[in-house]
Image (tube, rainbow, N blue to C red):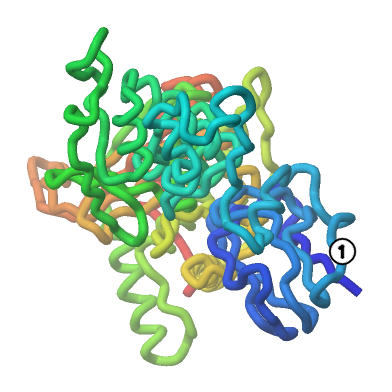
């Protein structure tokens, strides 16, 4: 009996996942426990393993496709078994593309009708003479191409290897081919045939009648390749964004488009938290505590205390309303190999400094390993976020709000600065750069400034039990 493999639902907030790579193809034999494909969602990565022994009968999607959760992805069974009942409507003709044909891996052109077809040697143009080869030549390994785009590329003499896809996962769709055809201009029959064979590009306007591009006008196109992605020319290369980068870019763009962001900056005397850091380090060496409490842990603890006094900053801005949280769900920005992740520590205000340090480290470790709960990565999970770039030597920066949150705090590196100690005395003390970006729709400048000053005061006068 054929068995369907669905896209798992990783967390309640996840609605779709992106296929990073299929590890099998149609016709492969698999055993229970074999990895079928990898997938990503909200910056976390997973692998789906087979629960069955059998043969891959169908794969309904391609690498890079975004698939709704619980949607059918592929079918495993015995050769010859039917899988039509499992084919998802959303996949369209992708299932057909995944099923190997005995004749060809690409669709063949329809037979011609009319006078040209009646006499195989009469009335045929240069383009018609190579029409049967154009379909397969127009499709170059690389980005996935929709069936309609493939047919259109063959008709217009467009090389899909030179087209950037705008569909899901970088898939080349019909509008991409239309745009490329418009850019390459009108082609003569011979020019179109040479374009279909690959290795050349159109200059857009040629030396033929009305600017038609002739075969002699075509220029050599030599793509470079970086990890399988095509670039252009010898002076630069075009590299497609990873799925992770696309998610981050989409989130940042959405944030700036849908909030009124403003950043205030202030320095905090860091002598107190430096003293606490030394105290914590000594306690760790003596075995009194079992966690290495960092400067950032103390800053996060101070932020939590300040948020208790400024509830409007511990909120989500919903346009014409505020979602005020009774507890602090602290988001912490984590730099991973796959990109920036912001997991949330729920009810962080209920933790002491040692437990807070442990939980923050666990969130960071899980994010870097890719085992973080996707629900904790949702922007809705945290009520306020802290992003620390002090370890990179950054003094000040303008962090971008993780909407719908109302604000985010950027923490910079320690910098020695002069301070008035009173009585005409000055000393050089370590200052910590604090950058508060807030949504001006939710918070006025005065309140934001007072909140930022409160964070500095909490840092300068922090009282904790280690």
Work out whether residue 139 or residue 433 is closer to the camera in this orientation and state it: 139
Tell me if residue 232 comes above or below residue 54 in the rendering.
above
Residue plotted at (72% across, 72% down): 56
* Quadrant housing the N terminus: bottom right
Q: Which residue is mark 1?
A: 82
Out of 327 and 241, give the one closest to the viewer. Answer: 241
Q: Is residue 446 visible?
A: no
- Image spot of residue 330 (x, y percent): 56, 52
Element carrying mark 1: loop
How many marks the image carries: the answer is 1
**Residue shown at the point (56%, 37%) measured from the top left:** 405
Residue drawn at x 78%, y 79% as measured from the top left: 51
Residue 419 occupies quadrant: top left
Q: Position of residue 128 (x, y in %)?
A: 45, 32
Pick whichever, 370 or 76, lies toward us: 76
Q: Residue furthest bottom?
A: 286
In this rendered view, identify the residue nearer to me: 242 or 443. Answer: 242
């Amino acid at each position: 009996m054929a068995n369907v493999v669905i896209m798992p639902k990783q967390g309640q907030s996840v609605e779709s996942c992106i296929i990073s790579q299929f590890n099998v193809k149609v016709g492969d034999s698999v055993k229970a426990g074999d990895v079928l494909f990898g997938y990503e969602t909200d910056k976390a990565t997973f692998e789906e393993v087979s629960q069955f022994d059998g043969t891959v009968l169908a794969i309904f999607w391609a690498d890079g496709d975004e698939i709704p959760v619980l949607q059918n992805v592929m079918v495993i069974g015995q050769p010859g078994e039917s899988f039509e009942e499992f084919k998802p409507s959303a996949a369209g003709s992708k299932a057909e593309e995944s099923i190997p044909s005995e004749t060809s891996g690409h669709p063949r052109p329809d037979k011609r009708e009319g006078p040209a077809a009646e006499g195989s040697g009469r009335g045929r143009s240069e383009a018609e003479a190579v029409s049967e080869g154009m379909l397969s030549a127009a499709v170059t390994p690389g980005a996935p191409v929709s069936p309609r785009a493939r047919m259109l590329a063959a008709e217009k003499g467009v090389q899909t290897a030179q087209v950037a896809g705008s569909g899901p996962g970088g898939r080349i769709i019909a509008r991409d081919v239309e745009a490329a055809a418009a850019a390459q201009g009108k082609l003569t029959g011979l020019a179109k045939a040479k374009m279909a064979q690959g290795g050349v590009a159109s200059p857009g306007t040629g030396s033929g009648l009305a600017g038609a591009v002739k075969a002699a006008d075509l220029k050599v196109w030599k793509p470079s390749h970086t990890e399988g992605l095509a670039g252009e020319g010898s002076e630069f290369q075009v590299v497609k964004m990873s799925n992770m980068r696309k998610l981050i870019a989409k989130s940042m763009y959405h944030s700036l488009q849908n909030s009124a962001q403003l950043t205030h900056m202030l320095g905090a005397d860091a002598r107190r938290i430096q003293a606490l850091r030394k105290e914590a380090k000594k306690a760790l060496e003596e075995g009194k505590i079992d966690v290495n409490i960092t400067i950032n842990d103390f800053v996060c603890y101070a932020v939590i205390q300040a948020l208790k006094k400024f509830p409007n900053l511990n909120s989500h801005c919903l346009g014409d309303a505020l979602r005020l949280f009774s507890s602090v769900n602290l988001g912490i920005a984590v730099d991973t190999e796959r990109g920036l992740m912001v997991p949330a520590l729920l009810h962080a205000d209920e933790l002491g400094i040692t437990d807070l340090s442990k939980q923050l480290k666990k969130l960071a470790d899980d994010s870097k390993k890719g085992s973080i709960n996707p629900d904790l990565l949702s922007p809705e999970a945290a009520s306020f976020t802290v992003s620390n770039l002090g370890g990179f030597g950054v003094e000040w920066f303008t962090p971008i709000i993780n909407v719908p949150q109302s604000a985010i705090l950027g923490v910079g590196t320690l910098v020695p600065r002069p301070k008035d100690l009173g009585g005409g005395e000055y000393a050089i003390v370590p200052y910590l750069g604090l950058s508060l970006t807030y949504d001006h729709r939710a918070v006025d400048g005065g309140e934001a400034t007072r909140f930022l000053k409160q964070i500095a005061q909490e840092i300068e006068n922090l009282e904790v039990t280690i």
